[in-house]
Amino acid sequence: MKLGPKAATAAIILSAGLALTGCGGTATSGSAGTAANALTIGTLQDVRSWDPAQAHVGHVLQPYQAVYDTLILRGPDGKLSPMLATGWKYNSTNTKLTVDLRTDVTFSDGAKFDAEAAKANMDHFKTANGPQMAQLASVKDVSVVDADTIDINLSAAEPALEYFLSQAAGLMGSPKALGTEGIKTEPVGSGPYVMDKAASVKDSQTVFTARKDYWNKDLQKYQKLTFKILTDLTARTNALVSGQVDATILDPKNGKQAEGAKMKLAANEG
């Protein structure tokens, strides 16, 4: 699972030996492409709408990343690499970004990912009044070149566009589900996990299981992924120390407390 950046004063504290790309707790890591058992993350709030156009950034982006691939993948080191987009190139004035797309990807409802789907998502993102709507403010329009190519036409050069396409603006949902009532409560993406609605409880926990027909097994690090909603900071600290969650977000003070209890500070981005 890929993870977004953390808030300025936040830290993610992990149980000893846990890495989000490896094993932790009772999970047993396998070779590349072999998912471990389970990961439970303590998070601050539940997702209010699973429409990808309503995704935010920071730690609240992470649940969306479980079910929605982005056009571009941003690694932990900040490096951008292909994901649903296999390549991209600007014109000489940096006002048009031509994006080549994968041809072997489907959404969890069976719909095919292609240029029309990518355009539908970006058009929807621009009009859905989401919290990160400004990420595509410079996009004049998106045109389909062929089945696996789009042109993103800009009103002015946007140096951060590739970065935005690795964040909220790059999340791709099924075009059949975009804008429907159903996608607000159940995500429909091409990502590595699908929601287990029977095991999920609003404002308590959201549970995901590995999608069987996912196109990139190397990104499926776990068979089961749970986001446990813990709004109280002390509750998150106690849940981490007691082993109820494998990772969570703490402030510097509680982070020191967790480190004193043999927890491992995995990231602290100021």
Image: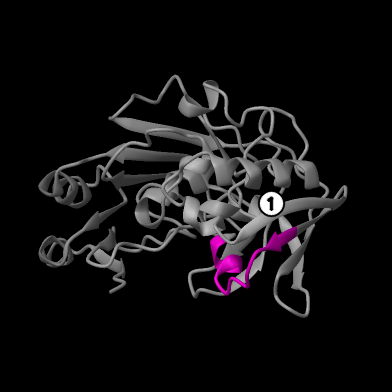
Q: Position of residue 183 (x, y in %)?
A: 53, 27
Give the residue drawn at x 72%, y 61%.
153
Give the residue drawn at x 74%, y 29%.
110
Judge whether residue 153 is colored magenta: yes
Q: Position of residue 187 (x, y in %)?
A: 53, 32
Q: Tell me the quarter of the picture where residue 156 sits.
A: bottom right
Looking at the image, can residue 181 be seen? yes
Looking at the image, residue 268 lies above or below residue 245 = below
Give the residue drawn at x 19%, y 47%.
236
Q: From the image, tell me which residue sits under label 1.
A: 216
In this picture, residue 137 sits left or right of residue 130: right
Looking at the image, residue 48 lies above or below residue 148 = above
Q: Position of residue 229 (x, y in %)?
A: 27, 38
Give the residue drawn at x 54%, y 68%.
75
Q: Nearer the viewer, residue 220 or 5?
A: 5
Judge whether residue 270 is colored magenta: no
Looking at the image, residue 121 lies above or below residue 203 = below
Q: Position of residue 210 (x, y in %)?
A: 57, 38
Q: Nearer the viewer, residue 106 or 149?
A: 149
- Secondary structure of the residue carrying tag 1 is loop
Q: Which residues are magenta?
A: 152-164
Q: Residue furthest right?
A: 146
What kind of residue is marked 1?
A: Asn
Query: Looking at the rendering, in which quadrant would you find the C terminus?
Result: bottom left
Looking at the image, can residue 32 be seen? no
Q: Nearer the viewer, residue 265 or 105?
A: 105
